[in-house]
Image: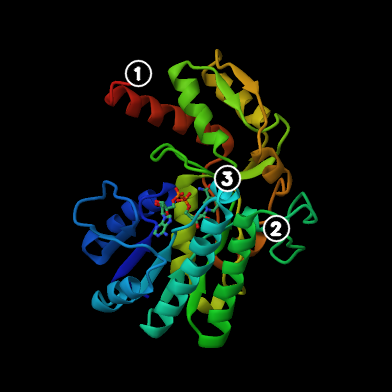
């Protein structure tokens, strides 16, 4: 399938801003509408529409008037912010997703892509090599709503044959957009401190193992899933993917190979409890078999790439 008119919600976030660049170079910027409640810089030719995913009327109009056939729905309230404001997380993540699915169904959208998260898992989930089908009892509002979104996506696929696809992202590492409100954000924050020579206070315990992935692989995987033949997919919303697993101490050790004077202190906060309820590693075998998921970056490669890109950017902006 060739995507003709693509709508991206939450386009100014950590994932959205990188997805938009890749979508516009693959399909042409004139095919893409970026929407968000905040503004951001976009690749030339990409149109921006200010849209709250809770505004169904506005969403129907944007989808209908622009002949949208593909939606990438990224607008969400992430784990740490979700615990601070569970009411907002519930409405944006549940009602917002429902609006996207319902508007897509009514307006004959062909494909809806929605990322899920390791946040759907809970303390009863096995810790290592978690398969797609397992015990799922999330304890955070983020996890509850993202699991609700998975179930909604599956429902729309089975009941209405709306082609809804999704995958459970692990923690994502990227240098382009500063992290917002996730539990794995330490793995991005620390690079800014390492590169600028500032000590870093880590909000997770040093032995907290979590599955992670570098952003180019995360974007590549999402697009690969979006382009896969539907007949090859055994699941709708819930493919597990992950590139590697580390704990803060392990990550800092690799960074110190390249920046030996990095100093870290540990002061776990409320995010420790969230991280403790998530698994340490995921089994990506179904994604590998069904749509050839294959990450390119291992941890060492990720760290080298993060350091060199961040240095370059901070030098350009006069911060280094
Ligand atoms: N970043 C990660 O580590 C990670 C990991 C797993 C899953 N995910 C998933 O990926 C998706 C994107 O996450 P992200 O990291 O880019 O998050 P982010 O917080 O960086 O971006 C979310 C965007 O949604 C926008 N938004 C919030 N409320 C909105 C509303 N009511 N209407 C319209 N836009 C609204 C925000 O302004 C923001 O630009 C989410 O579904 C998230 O659950 C992210």
User: Image quadrant of residue 209?
Assistant: top right
Give residue 48's mark. Answer: none
Q: Earlier in the sequence, mark 3 or mark 1?
A: 3
Of residues 8 and 253, the one nearer the viewer is 8
The residue at which mark 2 appears reads as 138
Q: Earlier in the sequence, mark 2 or mark 3?
A: 3
Q: Secondary structure at mark 1?
A: loop
Above or below — where is 247 with respect to 95?
above
User: Marks 3 and 1, how far apart in space?
Assistant: 29 Å
Q: Secondary structure at mark 2?
A: loop
The residue at which mark 3 appears reads as 80
Q: Secondary structure at mark 3?
A: helix
Above or below — where is 177 with respect to 86?
above
Above or below — where is 54 with respect to 248?
below
Of residues 144 and 295, the one nearer the viewer is 144
Above or below — where is 219 with respect to 195?
below
Counting from the top left corner in percent of width and height, residue 258 is at 52, 20
Q: Residue at x 39, y 31 (%)?
A: 309
Counting from the top left corner in percent of width and height, residue 180 is at 47, 42
Verify CB contact (< 8 Å) between mark 2 and mark 3. Answer: no
The residue at which mark 1 appears reads as 320
User: Marks 2 and 3, how far apart in space?
Assistant: 14 Å
What is the quadrant of the C terminus in the image? top left
Q: Residue at x 31, y 22 (%)?
A: 315
User: Marks 1 and 2, how far apart in space?
Assistant: 41 Å
């Amino acid at each position: 399938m060739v995507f003709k008119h693509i709508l991206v919600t939450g386009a100014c976030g950590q994932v959205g801003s990188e997805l938009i660049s890749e979508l516009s170079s693959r399909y042409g910027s004139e095919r893409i509408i970026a929407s968000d409640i905040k503004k951001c810089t976009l690749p030339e030719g990409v149109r921006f529409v200010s849209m709250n995913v809770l505004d169904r009327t506005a969403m129907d109009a944007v989808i209908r008037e622009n002949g949208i056939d593909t939606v990438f729905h990224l607008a969400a309230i992430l784990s740490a912010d979700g615990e601070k404001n569970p009411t907002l997380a519930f409405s944006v993540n549940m009602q917002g997703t429902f609006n996207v699915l319902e508007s897509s169904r009514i307006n004959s959208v062909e494909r809806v892509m929605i990322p899920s998260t390791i946040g759907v898992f809970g303390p009863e989930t096995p810790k290592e090599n978690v398969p797609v089908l397992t015990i799922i009892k999330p304890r955070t509002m983020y996890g509850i709503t993202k699991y609700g979104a998975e179930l909604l996506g599956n429902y729309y696929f089975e009941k209405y044959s709306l082609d809804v696809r999704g995958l459970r992202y692990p923690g994502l590492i990227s240098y382009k957009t500063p992290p917002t409100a996730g539990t794995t954000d330490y793995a991005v924050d620390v690079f800014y401190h390492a590169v600028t020579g500032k000590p870093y206070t880590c909000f997770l315990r040093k032995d907290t193992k979590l599955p992670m992935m570098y952003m180019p692989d995360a974007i590549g995987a999402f697009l690969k899933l979006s382009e896969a033949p539907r007949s090859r997919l055994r699941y709708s919303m819930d493919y597990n993917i992950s590139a590697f697993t580390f704990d803060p101490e392990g990550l800092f050790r690799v960074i110190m190979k390249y920046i030996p004077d990095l100093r870290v202190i540990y002061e776990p906060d409320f995010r420790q409890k969230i991280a403790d309820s998530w698994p340490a590693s995921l089994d990506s075998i179904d994604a590998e078999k069904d749509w050839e998921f294959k990450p390119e970056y291992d941890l060492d490669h990720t760290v080298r790439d993060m350091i060199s890109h961040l240095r370059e950017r901070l030098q350009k902006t006069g911060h280094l």
